[in-house]
Image: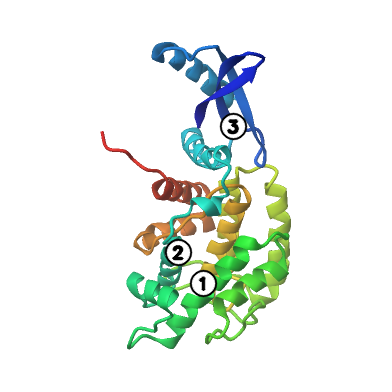
Amino acid sequence: MSFIEKQRHGKHFYYYLVKNFRTTPTKIRKLRVFLGREIPKHDELQKYFLELEKKAMEQYKTRWLPRGLVEMIDDLSASIIVFHKTPSEVLPKDFLVRYTYNTNAIEGNRLTLRQTALVLSDKIAPQGVRTEDIIETFNSVDAWNFVKSYKGRLNKAFVCKVQYEVTKNTSCRIQGDYRDGEVRIMGSEHKPPKPKDVPKLLDELFVEFYTQKKILHPVELATLLHNRFVNIHPFTDGNGRSARLLMNWVLLKNKFPPVIIEVVNKEEYYNAIEVADGGDQKPFAVFISNQLLAQYTIVLPN
């Protein structure tokens, strides 16, 4: 996101065209072009803008995301930094209701969006709904609050705590630890690894995460973690909800707002995961980037 910055030097004010750009996967710095003591007229300002964009484009390359898409999602993150806000501060008031409804509905929870809102705001259990659906709704909020405030490293203790918060007080047989039996993913041809291989595969994922953190764009890193995690499917239940929480944890740590995968996009979401299981991470990274832009970009009428 480019913007004009006004600075005072001595008795005079000077103007700069500024853009926040990414130099590494984890570092962002400002690039400035001096404009003078007055803001140039529109046509000349466009020349400065193109010069600034060209310099920024040369700074950093991504692995899976197209450059144009990266520019837009980085502008989204930069706008948060420019206005000195944390990602949590830009969330709409109904974010947690919509996040809870959608992440649970993807997994078969039967509560409607309105029922979810009633449960969370008024602690009302709608007549005729399953007790487990109500419990999952409260669990989702507890899990979100835990992940949002977590400052530690990605490790077994963290991911097991996330799964515990998601599944506590439900019929899930193993809460807060890896599975001890084989599982199947409904509607998917992917066969998760045997339970004896899960600890080793998760340990390898934790190492891979910190290795790739030095290389990948934060959105690419978040989506890679999600996909590797659901591919391993380490728990008896709560894998998808845990993976989406872990993905959002990475986004928040890197000053990106969290993403909601809406249940109406469930088929596209699952298809992108299937492609990732085959080794191609690009479709899922693009899918999540587009979801971020759709959820946090306001399109003004002409």
> Which quadrant of the figure has residue 165?
bottom right
- CA gap between label 2 and label 1 equals 9 Å
Q: Residue at x 56, y 46 (%)?
A: 85
Q: Amino acid at mark 2?
A: Tyr
Q: What numbered label is drawn on residue 140?
A: 1
Badge 3 marks a residue whose secondary structure is strand
Residue nearest the observer in this picture, 97 or 182: 97
Q: Residue at x 62, y 70 (%)?
A: 162
- CA gap between label 2 and label 3 equals 29 Å
Q: How is the image coloured?
A: rainbow
* CA neighbours of label 3 inside 10 A, class few (<14), some (14 to 19), many (20+): many
Q: Residue at x 41, y 69 (%)?
A: 101
Residue 279 shows in this picture: no
Q: Which residue is mark 2?
A: 99
Q: Amino acid at mark 3?
A: Phe
- Residues under numbered marks 2 and 1 in contact, where contact means CB atoms less than 8 Å apart: yes
- Pointer 3 or 1: first along the chain: 3
Q: Which residue is mark 3?
A: 21
> Which quadrant of the figure has residue 122?
bottom left
Where residue 271 appears, x then y in whole percent? 42, 58
Badge 1 marks a residue whose secondary structure is helix
Left/right placement of residue 115 relative to residue 1 reads left
